[in-house]
Image (cartoon, helix red, strand yellow):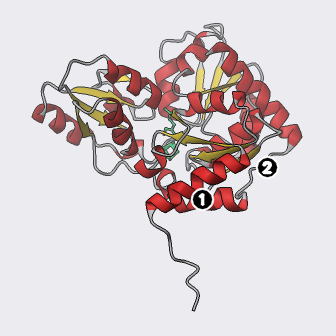
Amino acid sequence: MEFNNIVPDQAQLVKEINELKQKLNAVILVHNYQLDEIQQIGDFLGDSLGLSKQAANTENKIIVFCGVKFMAETAKILSPDKTVLLPVKTAGCPMADMVDIEDLRQLKRENPDAVVVTYVNSSTETKALSDYCCTSANARKIIESIPDDKEIIFLPDQHLGAYVTSNRQGRSILWKGFCPVHQRMKLEEIKQLKRDNPQAKFIIHPEAPASITKLADAIESTGGMVKYIKNLPENSSVIVGTELGMINRLRRERSDINFIPASSDLICYNMKSTRLVDVRDALKHKQYQIEVDPDIAAKARKAIKRMISIG
Ligand code: 13P
Ligand code: SF4
C-alpha cells in the first residue's frame, strides 16, 4: 500500500528544501507574516519593500516567494527572466482584489490630471495604470516627492492613503479598499490593553484605521517595526498592532521584550497558508510559476522602479 499524502517531519523537509535549493540555485524570500517554520528557512526575511529590492537584485535563477500573490508578481515584474514560484497558488490578498480595473479607468478619465499612487498590495493590472507604486515603508516619501498642490488618486488602502495624504494641500481621492485583518482591531480592546500595560509602547501598521493609529507611539511598516524595537530599553513591553506572525519575527530580534498582540484575531490566513511541505513541493515540481503579461508588466515596472528610485 502507498501513502503518498504522508507529510515527512520538519527536519526532513528542511533538509530536502536546502538540497533542492542548492541544486536549483534558488533563493527563498519570506515575508514577516509567514509561519515561524517558514521564517526560519528564509534566505531573506522582510517587509514588502525589502523583499522587492531583494527580488530585483538577486543572482539566483529561481525565486521562491513565501508571501502572497501580489508580492510574487512584483518579483516577477522586476526579474522577468527569473522563475518566480508561489508555493500556495491560492495565497492572495483580499485588499489587492478590491480594485475593479474598469472602475479605476473611469476614475482616471474623470480626473485626468491626478497622479495615481498605488500601494504595492495590488494586481499587476492596477500597477500598470499607476504613476507610482509605494509600500507602507515608503508611502510618505513617495507622496512628498509629488508637488503638494497636485491632485492624487491613492489606492487601494483607504487607511494608508488617509495617513500619508492628510497634510497635503492638493485634493486626494482615496479608494475605499482596506485590509480585513487590520480592520478587525477594536478600539475598546486597544484602550483596555493600554490601561492594563501603562508602560508598554504601542506600535501599529498604517493599514489600521485612524481611530486606532492615533493612539500609537509609532506607525510603521513591518520592517519599520523591526527597526523601532531594536532601540528600546531592555525588558520593555510593546503592544503590536499587526498580523500575529510579526510577533515571532520581533521576538527573534529582541527576546527580552514582552510583545503583546493587539488582538488574538489578527491572522492573515493567506499569509499563513504556506507550510514547509508547500515550499519543498514548490522546489521539487517548480510550482506555482508566476506569469505576467509582458506588456502590462512593462507598464507596472515603470511605477515600481519609480518607487524604488525614490525610497
Ligand atoms: P509590509 O510592507 O509592512 O511588510 O506590509 C505588507 C502587508 O501585507 C501588510 O498587511
Ligand atoms: Fe493583504 Fe491584509 Fe493579508 Fe497583508 S495582512 S496580505 S494586506 S489581507
**Secondary structure under the numbered disc 2 in the rendered image:** loop
**Disc 2 target residue:** 291
Where is residue 117 drawn, in percent x and y? 65, 25
Viewer-closest of 285 and 30: 285
- Can you say whether 93 is above or below 195 in the image? below
Viewer-closest of 143 and 274: 274
> Would you say 180 lies left or right of 175 here?
left
Image quadrant occupied by the N terminus: bottom right
Q: Are marks 1 and 2 in contact (CB under 8 Å)?
A: no
The residue lying at 12 percent from left, 32 percent from top is 195
Instruction: Tell me if residue 4 can be seen.
Output: yes
Disc 1 crowd rating (10 Å Cα; few below 14, some 14-19, many 20+) is: many
**Secondary structure under the numbered disc 1 in the rendered image:** helix
Disc 2 crowd rating (10 Å Cα; few below 14, some 14-19, many 20+) is: some
Q: Residue furthest bottom?
A: 1
Instruction: Tell me if residue 86 can be seen.
Output: no
Q: Residue 70: which quarter of the image?
A: top right
Q: Residue furthest right?
A: 295
Amino acid, disc 1: Arg
Earlier residue among tags 1 and 2: 1
The residue lying at 19 percent from left, 25 percent from top is 236
> Would you say 17 lies left or right of 12 here?
right
- Can you say whether 57 is above or below 295 in the image? above
Where is residue 139 drawn, in percent x and y? 56, 22
Tell me, for residue 280, which label it has, or none. Answer: 1
